[in-house]
Amino acid sequence: MKRLIQISLILLFCASAFATEIEGMRVWTGPEHTRAVFDLSDQTDYKLFELDNPPRVVIDLDDSKLTSSLTIKNNKDIKKVRFSTDKNRVRIVLDLQDDLKSKSFLLKPTGEYGHRLVVDLRSEHKPHVKTVAEVTRPNRDVIVAIDAGHGGEDPGAIGPSGTHEKNIVLNIAKQLAKKINAQKGMQALVIRTGDYYLKHRKRFEKARQNGADLFVSIHADAFHSAKVNGASVYVLNQRGASSEAAKWLAASENKSDQIGGVVIEDKKDVLSQVLYDLSQNAALEESHKAAKAVQASLKQVVKLHGKGFGQANFLVLKSPDVPSMLVETGYISNPGDEKKLQDPKHVDKLTRQIAQGIRNYFYQSPPPNTWIAAQASSVKNNKHVVQVGDTLSEIATRNGITMAELKSINNKSSNRLLVGEVLYLPN
Ligand SMILES: [Zn+2]
């Protein structure tokens, strides 16, 4: 009998020594889903099931113990978290606000994270997607998708004073959206609206579903040297990178999906690959034009990193048919840039120049059926490409109109001109 107690004590000790520890929980909520992430000390077996009345999700983890208490408040999807321990099994119950579908998976260590159990909750209801008729109605606005990189589980780069890239770029994206919406004929579509992660594919799919004419991904990444600073604009190049810096950036960016918590699905579909290559050639040409226009506009008032233009194999720019660019608004690893990117005055200047560059691109290359295209065709081919030394007042006088009229035709708010900018003139 004594021996038996000894053995069972040893077993109990072993079991607890090898038990997987549930070290904590994080919750990220987006408009379409809520993600609960449990940090684990090791991989473990678990069972998950959904129950009704009241709606709840139950997760049983074998050979586990809880080393921190789990709580949640003010969440639109999860009402309460409860847990209980029975021998070596931990049961976690998520009480839900509504009937939600769950999906769960384990993730291996990546970045700063160790083993994780991810539980995604989403309602069956689908968000409104614009129909073809809505997108092709005449005189429509051009739609600019603005995507703040990272989010939720993925903080992006972290600055010397602890600033997270995901927060900096969300603010910049929202400011840029305001400036886009202030322009006649242009409408912004903000892809990530809060602190949650969206996989790369989902980002450009949302842009496509809403008929976006341009996709702009906003970042402020880190570099291995704290000295490197300045903004730059990137486009996709599937064959390689234009510089070591571009290659390095793309490699660190592309890791986001793993850190953000995405299971890699390896689907090879030859036909879709062919269609993808065909349509992407056209989109790439437009991407170059748009990125060059933004680079030229930024150059006027913002310090660029080198020439401020590069190419690399960024996954988030792989939309088959929407021209796409990635704007590195600065390097968060540089203390000066880290500070500037949080300064409202600098953000105002930065977003004004990006919006202006985007506007210039659409006036040079207006998508059909848009208000901007209508402006272009109503003045037919009567336009002027700005040369070095041109001024607005001189162009207005030459064409027998006032400067205010010239600005109104071109929907311009400032008197500044860019070399290569297209100005429409009256017939
Ligand atoms: Zn980034």
Image: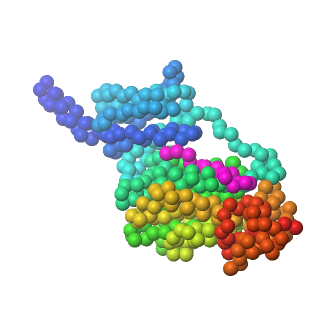
Which x, y percent locates residue 34?
A: 51, 38
Q: Residue furthest bottom?
A: 388
Q: Quadrant of the C terminus?
A: bottom right
Quadrant (top left/top right/bottom left/bottom right) for the N terminus = top left
The residue closer to the viewer here, 315 or 388, is 388
> Does 44 sit above or below residue 284?
above
Q: Residue at x 56, y 27 (%)?
A: 99
Quick check: 258 above or below 67? Answer: below
Residue 311, horizontal then vertical, whole percent: 57, 70
Instruction: From the image, give the main secondary structure of the stretch colored magenta.
Output: loop
400 or 104, which lies in front? 400
Residue lying at the far right of the rendered structure: 427
- Answer left or right for 202 relative to 388: left
Residue 380, picture quadrant? bottom right
Tell me: 348 left or right of 74. Answer: right
- Magenta-colored stretch includes residue 54: no
Residue 282 seen anywhere in this rendered image of the structure: yes
Spot the residue most to the top.
Answer: 53
The residue sitting at 62% across, 55% down in the picture is 179
Number of numbered discs visible in the structure rendering: 0
Residue 57 position in % (x across, y down): 47, 29
Rendered position, 255 above or below 289: above
Pick whichever, 267 or 230, lies toward us: 230
Regarding residue 60, the answer to whether it shows in the image is: no
Based on the picture, tell me whether residue 193 belongs to the magenta stretch: yes
* Colour scheme of the rendered structure: rainbow
The residue shown at (82%, 58%) is 374
* Magenta residues (range): 181-195
Q: Residue at x 67, y 67 (%)?
A: 415
